[in-house]
Amino acid sequence: MKTYSSQSIQKILVPIDGSDYSIRAEEYALSIAQTHQAEIVLVYVVDDLVVERLSAMATREAVAQELKNNGHRHIKYALDLSEKAGVAARSMIAEGRPFEQIIEFAKSLDVDIIVMGTYGRRGAERILLGSVAERVIEYSQCPVLVIK
């Protein structure tokens, strides 16, 4: 098992969704990356559940493609922030359940910390689906910093 210290931060995973929360999380991650000369890995996850819900209005493929296009726009913005901060960054877009994809990326990329914003689910949807951040905290094998 990997041991963690403030000196070992070399790779930071930042899940983004285009919300103010994820932008703030990236800003925190950039600050950490600058201090430790770490790399940022940005990930945008097209949520299967959202695709299924919206498929009633259009084909599944069209909905998924539109959400991926949104992801590319959010990724471009986040990469621009990283470039302006002088921080090395790369990005990925995945499709699936967000918390599962985030956990899988964290494991496969051997990241040192996940820095993420809280996600905006409220009310019954949050009760039924749970919070992405809560599930990432629960299942992550590395430290998770959640930015409000």
Image (cartoon, rainbow, N blue to C red):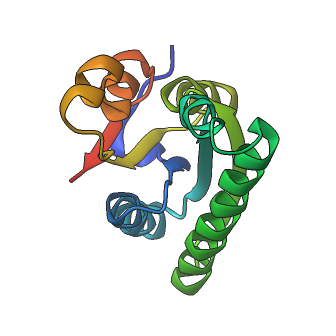
Residue sitting at the far bottom: 84
- Residue occupying image coordinates x 47% and y 47%: 9
Q: Position of residue 26 (x, y in %)?
A: 43, 63
Figure label count: 0
Q: Is residue 123 left or right of residue 113?
A: left
Q: Quadrant of residue 88?
A: bottom right
Q: Nearer the viewer, residue 133 or 36?
A: 133
Q: Position of residue 19 (x, y in %)?
A: 39, 61
Residue sitting at the far front: 57
- The answer to whether 28 is drawn above or below residue 63 in the figure is below
- Residue occupying image coordinates x 60% and y 58%: 39
Q: Position of residue 99 (x, y in %)?
A: 48, 28
- The answer to whether 20 is drawn above or below residue 100 in the figure is below
Residue sitting at the far top: 1
- The answer to whether 48 is drawn above or below residue 19 in the figure is above
Q: Nearer the viewer, residue 20 or 144?
A: 20
Q: Position of residue 102 (x, y in %)?
A: 55, 33
Q: Nearer the viewer, residue 36 or 146?
A: 146
- Residue occupying image coordinates x 71% and y 56%: 66
